[in-house]
Image (spheres, coloured by chain):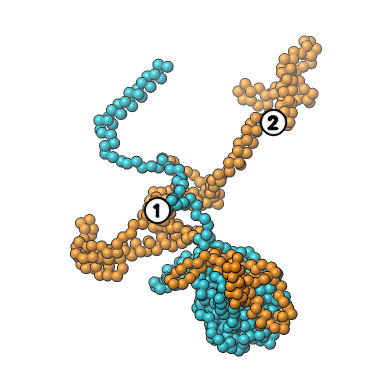
Chain colours: A cyan, B orange
Amino acid sequence: MNKMPVMQRIKKPTTRKGKKVLLAKEPKPVEGPKQCLFMQGRHPSERTRKLLKDIYDLKKPDAAYFTRKNDIVPFEDASLIEKLCDKKDAALFGVGSHSKKRPHNIILGRTFNYSILDMIELGAENFKAMSEFQNMKVLAGLKPCLLFNGPAWDLNQDLKRLKSLFTDFFYREKVETIRLQGLEHVLSFTATDDGMIYLRSYRIQLKKSGQRTPRVELEEIGPSIDFKLRRTKLAADDLFKEACRIPREAKSGVKKNISRDPFGSKLGRIHMGKQDVSKLQTRKMKGLKKTAEEKKQMLQKKKKAKKAASQAEAQA
Amino acid sequence: MDIVNQILEREQKKSEKYKPITVEKHLELEFDVGTLLAFDSNDLDTKSLSSKKDTYLQSLTRDNTQLLLNKVWELPTERIDEAVVVRLPQPTTILPRAKPVPKPKPLTKWQEFAKAKGITKKKKDKLEWDEQLQKWVPLYGFKKAAAEKEKNWLIEVPQNVNPMTDMYEKKATEKSEKVSKNELQRLKNIARARKVKIPRVGIPVTSDKASATQLATAATVAKASTASLGKFQDKLPKEKDARGKGIHELIPGKERKRKAPIPTPQAERENNLSMIDKILNKRPKIDIEKAVSKHINDEQLQRSEEKKNFKPPKGKRKAAGKGNVTNFSAKKPKGGRGQRNPSKKNPGRKRR
């Protein structure tokens, strides 16, 4: 499914607001945080519902939570999810469902250009909600520290992609600077060799250490989930590579030919192309125009020259 | 020395009061400080993971967090609005985008032209002073139509126009034509950008309004529209084929000429060298068949020459011979039906 750019459509938007919406939906070189949709599939269990709600709480404000049940089976038919992601302009989704075959099922995934890129199915074997930890939580919208423990994250291909997916879900957005006191949330993902993934969430307490760098102490705030890896649907390598392309605008290269002199003023060296002199329009001036007399003289001269030439020819 | 020892002791006591910030790890962690991410590839302690899962995970995470934050605290700090911030480096983890990288928008025909000519858009004021109304009038949009109405409460009919024309209606049609022309050009630009072929548009040709070139084109096309592509169609005296941009493509059977692409300097050089080689190493071609037939022809000529110059010996031969001497051959005697004499008035069979 390859869509054309939104604004290159033939029908013009009727209203100014409609135009603004379409413009906002257009692909941009540098993208903001990805929006996320949390949905409930067929017969979600209490656990999956709470779990999705907790992840939604962690993901706020870049997320939406659909409270109604929908007949969503992403691995069988992803068209509904693609449609919803298009409608809500979201690139991440989480679906919870529950069945005898796959109890407490959570599907996390992302889209590229409104079509599914990756989908990973996880079974929630153990779950302790955020509300069960009775302590102070972190502020919403904080950028968490992400920790991936265990060699399995690098060895297993599915887990490697899941690591990228989890990073995509929780890293929020690229920032230039960060407040040191704002570093108060850690999400830890521990993968074992038997396909278990332990998600833990802690609040950081910075303690004095007698040095500049503080001593870190953690307090669990929830949710705490034990995931089991189930089905996966990963993007083909070339599609993933295409999705990971970095536009030229986002690349930070060294700017050449810019220097500063000792007084701090900016100096630039520019390279000019060769000028096309033949196309140069010089100034037209009345003073440079030929008078009628001059023109006459020129004509006579020409005639004389012609005559002389013809005579010479005849003699020869 | 006493003082030094004292200070060292004090420092030691001080540090003992606090817990350490260093962590021993078998393998170094991989950090991506830009995304605040750390990856610990050390093997997990399976024993404690199964027995005291939560405490083990917490201690493991604490150690790794400490290492990550140590890295963050090493970064240069700044002060922005009473808060101490650190400047994060570029993230090294590359995450997929939500939408593809935007392609540059194709230029419209006008934009292309303006770029080639170096024409830049001039910013116009939204309001313009109107001398007639003595007030500021918007250039477009809100209240523009009202101002126009106020201004054009009367429109003079020019001398060269039918005095019964409705100038208001004329003005309205002109405006709507402009709008539709603009829309057409917008659509054309979209088609051009998407490389869609669209039929050429213009005023439909009617016989009373067609120009000379249009008629000539139509005639040329009609002539070429036979099964034999106009090969056997007669030409009128002084008739010329229509020529011009786009006409060649309309004529059936004419192929589009395509310019050969400009060769690369290397290919051009090779071509030239091979041509020079060909010229320098030119040898006459030997056509054996031709040579043989030429040889045979020469021989025949020689023989005929010999025969012409052959003088038969006098006497016996003459008596025996009758008819043409040169026509000596082993052919059957003609039995009196000899050669015809072309110099005679009515050539025919030789009569006796």
Discs 2, 1 touching: Cβ within 8 Å:
no
CA separation in Å, label 2 and label 1: 60 Å
Q: Quadrant of residue B342?
A: top right
Nearer-the-camera pick, B182 or A153? A153
- Above-or-below relation of A31 to A185: above
- Residue A97 in the figure: left or right of residue B164: right
Report which residue position mark 1 lands on: B114
Crowding around mark 1 (Cα neighbors within 10 Å: few <14, some 14 to 19, many 20+) is few
Mark linked to residue B285: 2
* Disc 2 secondary structure class: loop
Q: Amino acid at mark 1?
A: Ala
Q: Amino acid at mark 2?
A: Lys
Instruction: Evaluate whether residue B222 shows in this view.
Output: no
Point 36% across, 57% down: residue = B121
Point 73% across, 78% down: residue = B46
Nearer-the-camera pick, B296 or A179? A179
Point 45% across, 48% down: residue = A270
Q: Disc 2 or 1, which lies upstream in sequence? A: 1
> In the rendering, at what x and y percent does residue B224 appear?
51, 49
- Above-or-below relation of B194 to B247: below
Nearer-the-camera pick, A270 or B222? A270
